[in-house]
Image (cartoon, helix red, strand yellow):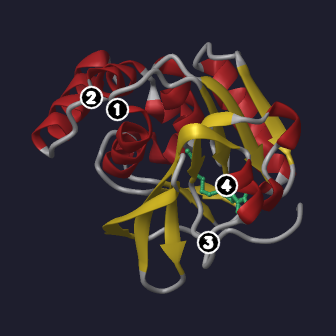
Amino acid sequence: MLSQRTRQRMADRLRQSGICDERVLSAMSQIPRHLFVDEALASRAYDDVSLPIGHGQTISQPFTVARMTELLITGRKPGRILEIGTGCGYQSAVLLKTGAEVYSIERIAPLLDQARRNLRSAQLIHVRLVHGDGHFGLPEAAPFDGIIMTCAASFIPEPLLEQLAEHGRMIMPLGEHEQHLLLLEKTPDGIQQTRLDPVKFVPLLPGRA
Ligand code: SAH
């Protein structure tokens, strides 16, 4: 149930659902997603559902992880990526496996520790995990080729746009009760915005916990 075959079947389903970036499909067929959730939920780790990860937070369903990763890196090298909302570390793992240099910020300290343990057990260690408030980004490591927010904001945090490299992309869920994915791209003419799929994410909250 937790075997390579199960992961491959998940990747096959993602392909059938329209995910076509081979780096994303390959990453998700390799990463043991069950190591990122509580043991009691491990048998559901490869179903296309979101799962609780403690502290009132959730890991997104595999399709959403794949879709956001694909939107961020398709047609380019992943480069340096900033994630807001480390959670259990699964999205960071997927980004790492696609070849990205990953920085990830989480506001809840015990979740960040958990993510560190999860990533280590999946033998992924080259990721910078930071305890902080993602609203402010990570100016000391900017500019970023991509920024991915895995919690929903009701506005676009200005510091994140500032920390985006020229031609950099940002993907985020925007809205409160009604949310959709927003893709932003920094161009010489300004920020281009594209409104995409309806989604349901936990909220971006202020401060550290
Ligand atoms: N990418 C995660 C999904 C985690 S859910 C995964 O793969 O598991 C979203 C996360 O965003 C939660 O862990 C929540 O604590 C975090 N979050 C919410 N507001 C934040 C903020 N201002 N800064 C950093 N993290 C935040």
Q: Give SS at disc 4.
A: helix
Relative to 152, does residue 162 appear above or below in the rendering? Answer: above
Can you give x and y, in whole percent of width and height, for residue 73 in the image? 42, 32
Q: Determine the CA span between mark 1 and mark 3.
A: 24 Å
Mark 1 residue type: Thr
Q: Determine the CA span between mark 3 and mark 4.
A: 14 Å
Q: Nearer the viewer, residue 88 or 167?
A: 167
In the image, taking residue 54 as reference, residue 14 lies left or right, namely: left
The mark lying in front, picked from 3 and 4, is 4
Q: Nearer the viewer, residue 32 or 153?
A: 153
Mark 4 residue type: Leu
Disc 2, disc 1: CB below 8 Å? yes
Q: Which residue is mark 1?
A: 74
Question: Mark 3 vs mark 2: which is more N-terminal?
Answer: 2
The mark lying in front, picked from 2 and 1, is 1
Q: Determine the CA span between mark 3 and mark 2.
A: 27 Å
Q: Which residue is mark 2?
A: 21
Mark 3 residue type: Ala
Q: Which residue is mark 3?
A: 153
Q: Give SS at disc 3.
A: loop
Can you give x and y, in whole percent of width and height, for residue 143 in the image? 72, 35
Can you give x and y, in whole percent of width and height, for residue 36 in the image? 56, 36
Q: Which residue is mark 4?
A: 161
Residue in view at x 63 percent, y 17 percent:
124
Relative to 165, does residue 117 appear above or below in the rendering? Answer: above
Q: Determine the CA span between mark 2 and mark 4.
A: 25 Å
